[in-house]
Amino acid sequence: MVIKTHRSWSISMKLWFAMTILILAVLGGLGFTLTWLFGDFYLQQKLNSLRSEAIEISAQLATEPSWSGRLNLLESLKLTSGAQLVLLDPQGNLVVMAGSITQQGSQNSIEWFPKGLSGSSISGWSRDLRPSDFFTEGYLEQVLSGQTISIKALPVNGGAQAMLLAATPVGTNPVRGVVLLGSSPIPIQESIATFRRLILYASLIAVFLATVISLIFAQHVTRPLGLMQRGATRMAKGDFLPIQGVTSKDEIGKLAEGLNSMGESLKNHMAWLSQEKNLLQGIVESISDAVVMMSCNGSILYANDSAKALWQENDIEVTERKIQIVTILQTMAQREDQVENFEMATIGIQVLQIVMAPMAENEGIRGHVAVLRDVTASLRAEKSRREFLASVTHELRTPLHLIQGYLEAIQDEVIPKDQNEEYIDLVLEEAKRLARLVQELQEINWLERGQVIQPVAIDLENFMVDIDQRFQGRAQELGVNLEICKGSGQLLADPDRLLQVFINLLDNALGHTPRGKTVRVLMVEEQNEISLAVQDEGEGIPKEALPYIFDRFFRVNKARSRKDGGMGLGLAIVRQIVEAHGGNVRVESDMGKGTTFWISLPR
């Protein structure tokens, strides 16, 4: 197995590389500027020179009325070296050509082309390229309209040759001909290529010199830097011995002195910080509340175990909860007032009481410290206590007011003596109602305190017969049919508590079933549990009330329940008893069709 090791670059290599890149960039940029930008400038200068010369020749030719006079004038002209002149008639036919685009060509040689024999000047030729070979119909139309144009012609037929052209009309209204003056850009391109080679040679020499200079300079600079680097590494590991061997008095020497001074200071501070850290950590970790320290930018600097427990489940961090808590803390920290602030926040089902204070230093605010206390349990207990007291007070107030009112009326002889017995019966009914309320409250308190039930083997057949005997008489009085199934088998349960469940359910069912309708008690046996049901054909329960039907003091029809003596505790007691047996209770109801309470109990 081959292990590859990667060596970091030394300072000398970095200096050499930096200087080399700098020189290459400068010379390369200069060469690019001179060759590409200035190259276009030289080509444009050549085009402008050809344009001026073509205009001058055109002006001279325009003074001659005949072609013979123009030919004589062309013979006396001296063209620029490397330039070739072509004279076209208004139809684009080649008439006269003088000069050559090569340095070896004769400058005064003139070739005459009679009209009709040269063919179109636009077409290709089986000979050396001429300026007219790059002159298209479009260019001809522009010149005949009186314009003087410059053309930087591209190579034709895939060749490597190009040409610089200037075209101008001869005469005006009408135009008697077209003067084309062309020259090859090859000399300029050769000069640019030569300049590029010079830039390349200069860059190579500069790179060599930069290498030598950077190595000499790095040898002088890196030695004290290496000593300081090794000394700083020792300091990072806890060894604060002074750096030795640096004798220069420049910035590097001052840096070595500064590092030695810093090492001595760090040595003293490390001991002090270690003691302070141990003390603070012991204090913070001993606090049962969550403690979070945040920086000015909102990141968490420290969190004790109690704080981590807020966003962890089984030592696994819940990112969503942590982000929610950090966002709340950041919002509190961003408030303009820097005094201690207080806030209550809800995280899921938890309610946190948060107190935050800034960590102030001489130069400003360093961060914030937040203490988070979970007050969920205390708030729930307080809420339950208030709701319970309000409900009990409400339930007790009505019968007590009635009893007090009736008794005061009897005492003051407001009620006739012959009606005293009737009102005494009413007072007795309210007193019994109070007694039932107290009894039911005692039952709920007994069940909520987790009192152990006394399960025994119950014969379901006898149990159903007992229920039938208890309720058939009342069902007949109300005119309601009561059908109770025949039980079978045994069930392990507390018979008194189970009987209380059916008493509460059947009281409700009979009280809410109209005359002539039926109330049924059903039983379904399964492998591991027995399901019992009380089904009526009453008015039913609204869907929006079903989730709250087992809550204490909840009544679907408050007016009727109060009239019938109901206090909303019967179903709450049913649920407590069933759950104490390890079972569950549920309700099914359709408005106008009736309600069914299902009780599932384990065998």
Image: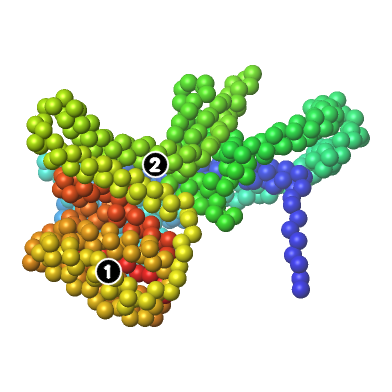
Q: Please identify the quadrant where the N terminus is shown.
A: bottom right
Q: Position of residue 565 (x, y in %)?
A: 21, 47
Which picture quadrant has residue 409?
top left
Write the residue at 58% across / 38% down: 289
Residue 27 shown left or right of residue 500 in the figure: right
Categorize mark 2 by other alpha carbons within 10 Å: few (<14), some (14-19), many (20+).
few
Q: Position of residue 571 (x, y in %)?
A: 29, 56
Q: Secondary structure at mark 1?
A: helix
Write the residue at 67% across / 39% down: 285
Q: Please identify the quadrant where the C terminus is shown.
A: bottom left
Would you name the residue on which mark 1 appears?
Answer: 467
**How many numbered marks does the figure carry?**
2
Vertical relation: 233 (above or below) 459:
above
Nearer mark to the viewer, of 2 and 1? 1
Q: Are marks 2 and 1 in contact (CB under 8 Å)?
A: no
**Closest to the observer, 238 or 158:** 238
Write the residue at 31% across / 36% down: 393
**Closest to the observer, 343 or 92:** 343
Residue 392 shown left or right of residue 18 in the figure: left
Vertical relation: 2 (above or below) 404:
below
Categorize mark 1 by other alpha carbons within 10 Å: few (<14), some (14-19), many (20+).
some
Residue 160 shown left or right of residue 356 in the figure: left
- What amino acid does circle 2 point to? Ser
Q: Secondary structure at mark 2?
A: helix
Residue 235 shown left or right of residue 422 in the figure: right
Q: Position of residue 267 (x, y in %)?
A: 84, 32
Write the residue at 55% across / 51% down: 312
Which picture quadrant has residue 589?
bottom left
C-alpha gap between disc 2 and disc 1 = 35 Å
**Closest to the observer, 603 or 109:** 603
**Residue 384: which numbered mark, if any?**
2
